Amino acid sequence: MPLPTPRLLTGAALALVLTTVAACSSPTATPGTAASDASVTLYSGRNETLVQPALDAFTEATGIAVEVRYGGTAELAAQLLEEGDRTRAHVFLAQDAGALGAVAKAGQFATLPEATLDLVDDAWSDPDGRWVGVTGRSRVLAYNGSMVSGDALPASVFELTGPEWKGKVGVAPTNASFQSFITAMRVQHGDEKTRDFLEGLAANEPQLREKNGVIVSDIEAGAYPVGLVNHYYLWEAAAEKGVPADQLATKLHFFSDGDTGALINVSGIGLLANQPDADGQALVDYLMSTAGQEYFATKTFEYPLVSGVATAPGLTPLDQLDAPDINLSDLDELEATITMIKEAGLL
Amino acid sequence: MLERVRAVRRPELLVGALLAAAVALIPAVYLVVRVAEAGLPRILAEVTTPRVAAMAGRTLALVGLVWLGSTIFGVTAALLTTRTDAPGRRVFGVLLALPLAVPSYVAAYTWAAVADLWEPSGRFDGFWAAVLVLTLYSYPYVYLTVASALAGQDQGPAEVARSLGEGEWGVLRRVTLPGVLPAMASGGLLVALYTLSDFGAVSILRVDTFTRAVFTAFSVGFDRTGAVALASVLAVFALAIIVVERLARGAEKRYARVGSGGPRRPRPLGLGWGRLPAAAFLGLVAAVALGVPLASLLRWFLAGVSRPGSIGEVVAAMGASLGVSLLGAVLTVALAIPLGLYAARVRTPLALGLERLVFVTHSLPGVIIGLSLVFFGINVAYALYQSVWLLALAYVTLFLPLASAAVANAARQAPPSLEEAAESLGLTPFAALLRVTLPVMLPGIGAGAALVFLTAMKELPATLLLRPTGMDTLATRLWTYTSVEAYAAAAPYAAILIALAAVPTWFLATGSGAFGRDDS
């Protein structure tokens, strides 16, 4: 059977390409012109397993479908910056304030209404009202209860550069939460003291890991006794093992007296500018409502930031923590922090 | 026998080749745009620091060692399985190709996980761990290309050498190995460029290479300029490696057989007492490379309580993986054919340069490729943005070198005299291409498609950035679960991914004809 002539082939190929391109053109979500469509597009830097149930509950309560794009917080922030005002996202849920700050700085967020911002303390939202904190995440020292007794634990995070902690401290310098912690130290104690801490830590044979979760599993396995992580990783480790958190060997030590080690960071949410309808605000309202906050308190074991919502049992309530008095928007200046961490050799 | 091919102009191939190159160079254009935006002084300031110099040394050392290890092991294994009488060589021959089906991030995760079997606080990480893992899971690039070349090698020169008094080892050294030098070089090039671009293994094993630094630059302070600067250095390294490979290979010789006569089976090399040790060696490597990941996955699945959401979730991920990988493979091969043919038929520097230029993109980290296509989608092809077509285009930019290497190798082994004969019988050059050359090249094209398909299935960072909102592939599902330490839920996805990727790998191994023949 002879092959079709080249012309016929080319024509057919061209037709095929054009048809498929046409068929695959999705309706563009040009800002401002789409009618309310009971659907909202969310870019979530928070993991699907943690957040999807809350979004499903939102859809059930309001009838608004949520199309979620999951990714790493940093990659999604980079994507939003790249997309500019042609973004298809309506809402951005980020794992840390730094990412929200970066998008806010590029002028891509809409200002949130006063009613939303008033739900939380000023410390937990952007001073210009462009994003609001949804849950709180406390820095802690996780420790293996059988390797270290409670009274041997340091009172201040600065003690971790001492000789008794040589080779025994796990840290994850590539993690946003560690960088926020170091920036907070710069704000609270100045660059000089921070540089000394970083160099002391680097010289003390720290156990460097890529992720906080790995540090907690290492501590649980007895690889080393302590590590600087966020509080909720304990419950994440417990969930994977299928046991209640208090049955793990790993315990949490909260620093107190306003020590930098007690820093509370937030996961937060912002509305992209040019909202086509009120669905995005509805999603924000839900996550800040009692139902939404209770979900985070009981399922992800984070701190609800809206007052009047109970913290998970077994977790020291927010108002009993002696966190340092730091405005999270001051933690925006990450560049100098990163340079400092790099120069100390931790990154 | 060996002859130089005369230069012939082929405008229709040139158009196709330029189109392919244009697509593959989208990330390069993105880098140039962003570099211009930031200004060259800022970029130079970012890259001329002692830390970057140390990173450069480390990255190049990693690339060099992995290339060396892959080449040595790949060639040795290819020889042992195709040209000796080692027992079990056909079985090992196929098994030794299968590590290609294991994504580097899965390999690194699972190897790191067995460290605690050795000692409770054992750690498997650092530079040498990365060298081991990257060598073990990318040597198949060299192994498969060399094995296939050995299978297709004309036996004429070997017989002439024997008739002139060379012993078997002499024939090996002086005829066989030089004959597969192009295959070694092209496989080695893929290994080197892949190692430059790899992020999964180096991030899990904590080696500070350029790719990891690019990712860190994004995630710490959203420093696009820093990331772009580092990625540009990677592109420069890639260009340097490509140029070095070109120079080392010297003049292009064609290795096709034009004479008459049936293909003669190569005479197997007798190993004597070395037969069993050789077989044991091959078996050990295959067992370790495949066994460690599978053992770790099983351990995780049994030790943890998390599980995938539902069968539907798993099936949807499988369907999506297969669908986009297939689309990507078809698109890539369609563009690789004119590119590879142009490079093989037209011997001008432009042609060869074009074919090699697309390799530069292969060295860039997936996150840069992803962002460059976001840039392209937002600014040029908005209708395609966040659709499977843009994702498939990303696969083209990432994997065009894989396909074009296979196509070019196949084109080199298809003698142009057949085309000339067809033209002398009245066909136009284009028709001769379609009706004579392409059918002959079909096995090579198929190999290219299989390679792109299996590599696309493993791809993660670009897929995360470009997938249609709500679509998940096996790789992205794996990422979702490992991000929250839910390794037991991740394990089935990893296992299915490896199993599905093993199918085209198996075809690559057996289709080359290197391991399927009866002994004579």
Image (cartoon, grey):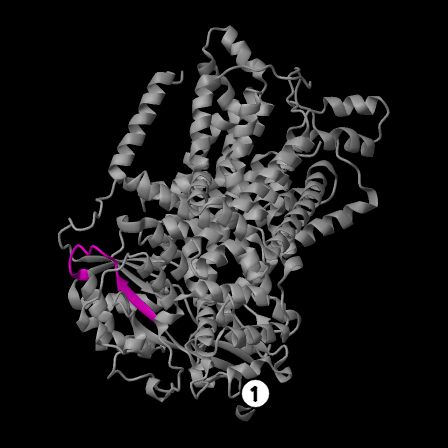
Residue A267 is covered by the magenta coloring: yes
Residue visible at 47% across and 42% down in the picture:
B398
Residue displayed at 56% across by 52% down = B210
In this view, the residue in front, B4 or B520, is B4
For mark 1, name the chain. Answer: A
The magenta-colored residue range is: A266-279
On screen, residue B395 versus residue B158, left or right, reads: left
Q: Is residue B232 above or below residue B309?
A: above
Give the residue pinned by disc 1.
Answer: A146
**Residue placed farthest to the right in the image?**
B165
The residue at 47%/80% (across/down) is A261
User: Would residue B313 appear left or right of A188 to someone viewing this image?
Assistant: left
Residue B217 % position (x, y) = 48, 57
Q: Going by the image, does B88 lie left or right of A271? A: right
- How far from the left and from the top, in percent, is residue B355? 53, 30
Q: From what the image shows, is residue A112 above or below residue B390?
A: below
Q: Would you call the spot at circle 1 few (<14 residues within 10 Å), some (14-19), or many (20 or more)? A: few
Outermost residue, bottom direction? A151
Residue B36 in view: yes
Badge 1 element = loop
x, y percent for residue A172: 52, 69
Q: Which residue ends up furthest to the left in the rendered image?
A: A35
Quadrant housing residue B116: bottom right
Q: Nearer the viewer, residue A339 or B361?
A: A339
| Quarter the C terminus of chain B occupies | top right
Circle count: 1
Where residue B141 appears, as percent x and y from the top left, is 60, 42
> Considering depth in this image, is B290 or B375 the residue closer to the camera?
B375
Name the amino acid, label 1: Ser
Camera sees residue B444: no
